[in-house]
Each structure stands twice: as structure tokens, then as C-alpha cells.
Image (tube, rainbow, N blue to C red):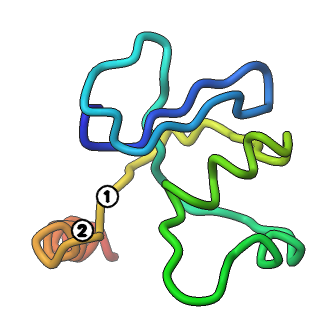
């Protein structure tokens, strides 16, 4: 978890989000998957570069606008070419 986003939750709400904390956080989930955004979220994204984990998600927590749901299926980190290749190979072996 040290190099993944850490998410602390209470019921359906995210109460804390720490991008790559560098340590284990008891009770935290790993931030993974995909996001569904209301159009108004784009209003808090500044022009130029924004890091979603460092700039946007923590703001949504403060505004009490970040919710979560647990996914119990496969999750692949496709943020690198190696990770994308592994996901493609996995999916290729399961296509009927």
C-alpha cells in the first residue's frame, strides 16, 4: 500500500485520502479502479497540471463529496506499459 493511494472510509463516504503515504495505514483501502464524476468536479480542477491523487481527491474529501464502493473483481494497474501488457495478456487468455 505504501506506493498506492490510501483511502479511509466510514459507511459510503471517503473520510481521508492520502496519495502514496509511504507507509502502511491500518484500516485503509487501496485507491484503485475508476471514477464517476459529476460535471461540477471539473470546476475545482485548475488550468494546467493537476494531480488527481494530490490535488483533486483530497479537496473532494474536505467538501464531503467523495464516496466509495468496494470492487471484488480483478484490478490491474495499467499506469505503466508493463502493467498494461500484463492486463492485456490476462484478458487475452479469457476471451472466448
SS at mark 1? loop
**Residue found at the very far bottom of the displayed protein:** 48
Contact flag, marks 1 and 2 (Cβ < 8 Å): yes
Query: Considering depth in this image, is 48 or 95 the residue closer to the camera?
Result: 48
Percent position (x, y) of residue 16? 62, 30
Up-down relation of residue 59 to residue 21 (above or below): below
Residue 72 is left or right of residue 1, and the answer is: right
Quadrant that contains the N terminus: top left
Up-down relation of residue 90 to residue 14 (above or below): below
Q: Where residue 76 is drawn, which disc sits there?
A: 1
Quadrant for residue 37, please give it: bottom right
Query: Considering depth in this image, is 48 or 69 the residue closer to the camera?
Result: 48
User: How far is disc 1 from disc 2 in space, using C-alphas?
Assistant: 6 Å
Residue 83 is left or right of residue 14, and the answer is: left
Quadrant that contains the C terminus: bottom left
Q: Where residue 7 is drawn, which disc sits there?
A: none
Judge the density around disc 2: few (<14), some (14-19), many (≥20) Cα neighbours within 10 Å: some
* Residue shown at the point (10%, 71%) measured from the top left: 82
Kindly identify which residue carries mark 2: 87
* Residue shown at the point (16%, 72%) measured from the top left: 89
Up-down relation of residue 56 to residue 88 (above or below): above
Percent position (x, y) of residue 13? 78, 32
Quadrant for residue 92, please give it: bottom left
Amino acid at each position: 500500500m505504501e506506493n498506492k493511494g490510501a483511502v479511509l472510509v466510514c459507511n459510503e463516504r471517503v473520510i481521508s485520502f492520502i496519495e502514496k503515504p509511504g507507509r502502511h495505514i491500518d484500516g485503509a483501502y487501496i485507491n484503485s479502479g475508476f471514477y464517476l464524476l459529476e460535471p461540477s468536479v471539473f470546476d475545482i480542477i485548475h488550468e494546467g497540471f493537476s494531480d488527481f491523487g494530490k490535488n483533486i481527491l483530497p479537496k473532494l474529501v474536505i467538501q464531503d463529496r467523495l464516496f466509495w464502493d468496494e470492487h471484488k473483481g480483478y484490478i490491474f494497474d495499467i499506469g505503466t506499459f508493463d502493467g498494461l501488457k500484463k492486463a492485456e495478456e490476462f484478458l487475452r487468455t479469457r476471451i472466448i
